[in-house]
Image (cartoon, grey):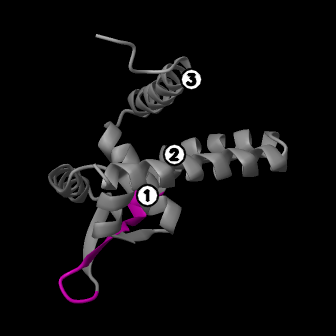
């Protein structure tokens, strides 16, 4: 069997895995699951509510995982569901959820912003530009499989 992954791709995969591991560690330190971190992060990124379908799409989590985690968050009085257009629902933070998010996921968001704020704006733009370029090329090539 030959070598299938370039050294650059190995390095990239390592970096992505290490970044994911850091987010996992943050979940552990905050006492929440990875899926709860991602769901609350997505809601906070939108404000205090977010369409349920957007949470599934933006987190990359399965519909079942999102629904299970949202149900648990509802039981813990962190979120509630409200009807939106037609069959769609919004996931909304309760007062307790806002407070909980401020002491957990918003801390992660602030750290991320501090990091980008410490970089030259041209470096941030280049990083985002190249990441987006990679994403679009990957999607395009996967769609042609």
Taking the spot 44% from the left edge, 31% from the top edge, the residue there is 20
Mark number, residue 5: none
Give the SS element for disc 2: loop
Could you tell me which residue is drawn at 21 percent across and 51 percent down?
62
Please state which of residues 129 and 73 is positioned toward the viewer in this rendering.
Answer: 129
Quarter occupied by the N terminus: top left
Q: Which residues are magenta?
A: 85-98
3D distance between C-alphas at marks 2 and 1:
15 Å
Question: Looking at the rendering, which quadrant does residue 89 occupy?
Answer: bottom left
Which residue of the protein is positioned furthest toward the front in this rendering?
2
Circle 3 is placed at which residue position?
8
The answer to whether marks 2 and 3 mark residues whose Cβ atoms lie closer than 8 Å is no
Report how far apart the C-alphas of labels 1 and 3 lie in the structure: 30 Å
**Is residue 7 in view from this perspective?**
yes
Label 3 element class:
helix
- Residue named by callout 2: 103
Give the number of the disc on residue 42.
1
> Residue 26: x percent and y percent?
47, 31
Earlier-in-chain disc, 1 versus 3? 3
Q: Are marks 1 and 3 in contact (CB under 8 Å)?
A: no
Q: What is the x, y in percent for residue 38?
A: 39, 48
């Amino acid at each position: 069997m030959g070598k299938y992954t370039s050294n650059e791709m190995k390095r990239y995969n390592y970096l992505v895995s290490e970044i994911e591991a850091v987010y996992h560690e943050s979940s552990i330190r905050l006492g929440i699951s990875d899926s709860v971190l991602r769901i609350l992060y997505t809601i906070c990124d939108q404000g205090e509510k977010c369409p349920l379908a957007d949470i599934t799409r933006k987190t990359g989590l399965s519909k079942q995982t999102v629904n299970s985690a949202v149900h648990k968050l509802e039981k813990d009085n962190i979120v509630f569901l409200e009807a939106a257009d037609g069959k769609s629902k919004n996931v909304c933070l309760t007062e307790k959820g806002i407070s909980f998010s401020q002491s957990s996921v918003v801390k992660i968001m602030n750290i991320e912003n501090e990091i980008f704020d410490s970089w030259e704006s041209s470096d941030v733009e280049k990083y985002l530009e190249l990441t987006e370029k990679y994403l679009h090329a990957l999607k395009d090539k996967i769609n042609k499989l």
